[in-house]
Image: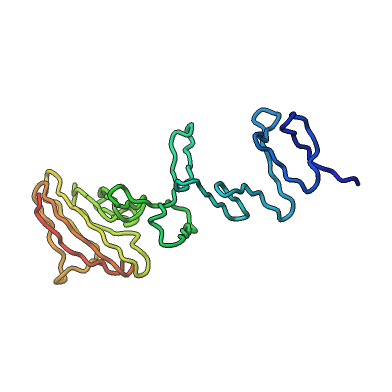
């Protein structure tokens, strides 16, 4: 079979010609386009070959690795939303002065969200257990506090109520949370705590019973909820 050479456009006269074997494909000032509207361009290397966009300043793509270089500004990647590209999330390299060496960030192996700090360096764990306040209502005389939903809870006593705690951290993970308890406008509602709560002196505190009274309690567990240490932070605050 005779040698075959790729067809290229001669930029001097826009004529199509063959590229001799061993020569580079120079398309300076030209582009690679499709003849059909909205057509795709496929780059399919043979065997173990790779597709590479190279240069001192530019993008280098190899098997399993993408390098983004730049001409004097920190490199970034913008990921746009699905609604007319109206918004984006930008992943950006730190400034040169902030480096003490190369950095590797390994993504988690489970589905979730990446956390970030706000302008005041405060981090809120979305859907997690820190920085989130959850209101809990009683049902059938029981108010259940799901520790997967936050570390700060509020509840208003509208009936005689028994507290229950669920989903503490596993193993020896620290679970610490606060509950603000408020009597409703009637007051006089009683409150019972789980038997797994250990209080100083061995007895649970009496809840304030005046209308709209507020009590604050703190609970800590380090054994997956076998024992919750109960602390009275304040009472009759209303």
Comparing 223 with 120, the one in front is 120
Comparing 115 with 70, the one in front is 70
Seen in the picture, residue 214 relative to 104 is either above or below; the reply is above
Seen in the picture, residue 195 relative to 24 is either above or below; the reply is below
71 displayed left or right of 227: right
Comparing 59 with 119, the one in front is 59
For the point 16% across and 49% down, the residue is 182
Seen in the picture, residue 170 relative to 208 is either above or below; the reply is below
For the point 15% across and 60% down, the residue is 233
106 displayed left or right of 13: left
Q: In this view of the protein, can residue 57 be seen by the observer?
A: yes
Residue 13 position within the rendered picture, expressed as x and y whole percent measured from the top left: 75, 29
Q: In this view of the protein, can residue 139 be seen by the observer?
A: no
Residue 229 position within the rendered picture, expressed as x and y whole percent measured from the top left: 23, 67
For the point 68% across and 38% down, the residue is 27
126 displayed left or right of 189: right
Residue 72 position within the rendered picture, expressed as x and y whole percent measured from the top left: 46, 46
Comparing 112 with 95, the one in front is 95
Seen in the picture, residue 3 relative to 16 is either above or below; the reply is below
């Amino acid at each position: 079979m005779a040698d075959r050479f790729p067809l290229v456009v001669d930029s001097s006269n826009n004529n199509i010609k063959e590229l001799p074997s061993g020569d580079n494909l120079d398309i300076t000032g030209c582009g690679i386009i499709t003849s059909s509207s909205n057509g795709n361009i496929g780059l399919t290397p043979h065997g173990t070959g790779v597709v590479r966009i190279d240069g001192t300043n530019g993008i280098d793509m190899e098997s399993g690795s993408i390098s983004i270089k730049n001409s004097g500004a920190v490199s970034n990647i913008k990921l746009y939303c699905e609604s007319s590209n109206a918004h984006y999330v930008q992943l950006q390299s730190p400034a040169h002065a902030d480096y003490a060496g190369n950095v590797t960030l390994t993504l988690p192996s489970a589905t979730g969200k990446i956390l970030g700090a706000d302008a005041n360096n405060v981090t809120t764990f979305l859907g997690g257990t820190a920085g989130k306040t959850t209101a809990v209502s009683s049902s059938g005389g029981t108010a259940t506090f799901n520790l997967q939903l936050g570390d700060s809870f509020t509840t208003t006593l509208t009936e005689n109520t028994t507290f229950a705690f669920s989903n503490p951290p596993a193993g020896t993970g620290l679970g610490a949370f606060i509950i603000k308890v408020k009597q409703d406008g009637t007051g006089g509602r009683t409150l019972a705590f789980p038997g797994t709560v250990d209080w100083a002196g061995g007895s649970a505190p009496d809840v304030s019973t005046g209308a709209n009274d507020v009590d604050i309690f703190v609970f800590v567990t380090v054994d997956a909820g076998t024992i919750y240490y109960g602390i009275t932070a304040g009472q009759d605050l209303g």
